Image (tube, helix red, strand yellow):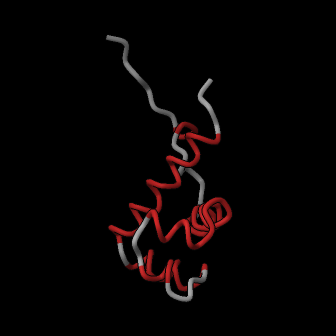
């Protein structure tokens, strides 16, 4: 077995703020597409970055879903070498 040494640079969330994550997701999916993928009211009812950030910072399960979708998006946008 070869030991794996994960480095911070391999973590797509390293050094990325929640606001950057949300902005990237909205830019890619738009609010409607984001609401279809993650059923959170702040994405479907009068969505804004500010209100969504406020909700996500207080709601760990929702933040995990958003971060997970971001990681998937980054993997598809940047093919592995």
Q: Residue at x 55, y 50 (%)?
A: 14
Residue 19, placed above or below residue 64: below
Where residue 48 sits, quadrant-wise, is bottom right
- Quarter in which the C terminus is drawn: top right
Where residue 75 sits, quadrant-wise, is top right
Residue 78 in the image: state x and y as whole percent: 64, 37
Q: Residue furthest top?
A: 1
Residue 57 in the image: state x and y as whole percent: 44, 76
Closer to the camera, 68 or 18?
68
Residue 65, placed above or below residue 46: above
Closer to the camera, 19 or 65?
65
Q: Is residue 61 left or right of residue 44?
A: left
Q: Residue at x 56, y 72 (%)?
A: 32
Where residue 39 sits, quadrant-wise, is bottom left
Picture mark count: 0
Q: Is residue 3 left or right of residue 12?
A: left
Q: Residue furthest bottom?
A: 46
- Quarter in which the N terminus is drawn: top left
Closer to the camera, 79 or 44?
44
Residue 56 in the image: state x and y as whole percent: 44, 75
Q: Residue at x 40, y 61 (%)?
A: 65
Q: Residue at x 51, y 34 (%)?
A: 7
């Amino acid at each position: 077995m070869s030991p794996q040494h994960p480095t911070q640079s391999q973590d797509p969330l390293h050094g990325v703020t929640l606001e950057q994550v949300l902005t990237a997701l909205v830019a890619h999916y738009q609010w409607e597409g984001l609401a279809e993928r993650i059923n959170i009211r702040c994405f479907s009812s009068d969505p804004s970055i500010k209100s969504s950030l406020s909700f996500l910072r207080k709601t760990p399960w929702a933040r995990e879903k958003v971060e997970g979708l971001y990681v998937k998006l980054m993997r598809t946008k940047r093919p592995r070498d």
